[in-house]
Amino acid sequence: MRIDELIGDFPDCEAEVYFGGPVQTDTIHYVHNVGDLLEDSTKVVDGVYWGGSYSKLKFFN
């Protein structure tokens, strides 16, 4: 499933969504490579970030 199919107000985006756990099914967690542009991201390793501003994430597809 793609993220734009799962979340109605998400712009067209071909990013795949994976279901897993143990996490709540009503939350979204994401890793990305735009941590220097997406405020509140947490650096995991060089070039890999977790989370950040969800409202701004929509503009990085």
Image: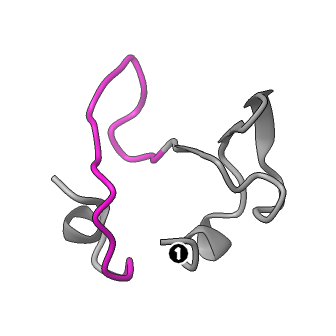
Q: Where in the figure is residue 44, as x and y percent of width and height? A: 74, 27
Residue 13 lies within the magenta run: yes
Look at the magenta stretch and give its main secondary structure.
loop
Relative to residue 24, is residue 58 depicted above or below? below
User: Nearest the camera: 56 or 37?
Assistant: 37
Residue at the image position 70 percent from the left and 56 percent from the top: 34
How far from the left and from the top, in percent, is residue 58? 52, 75
Q: Which residues are magenta?
A: 9-28
Is 3 on the left or on the right of 29, as rendered?
left
Q: Answer left or right for 49 relative to 8.
A: right
Quick check: 42 above or below 26? above
Residue 60 relative to residue 4: left or right: right
Q: Residue at x 15, y 52 (%)?
A: 1
Q: Which residue is mark 1?
A: 58
Q: Residue at x 76, y 52 (%)?
A: 35
Q: Nearer the viewer, residue 7 or 24?
A: 7
Q: Residue at 71% x, 54% y: name it.
A: 52
Residue 37, compared with residue 25, is above or below; it is below
Q: In the orientation shown, which residue stands out farthest toward the top? A: 22
Count of numbered marks: 1
In the rendered view, would you say 42 is above or below 12? above
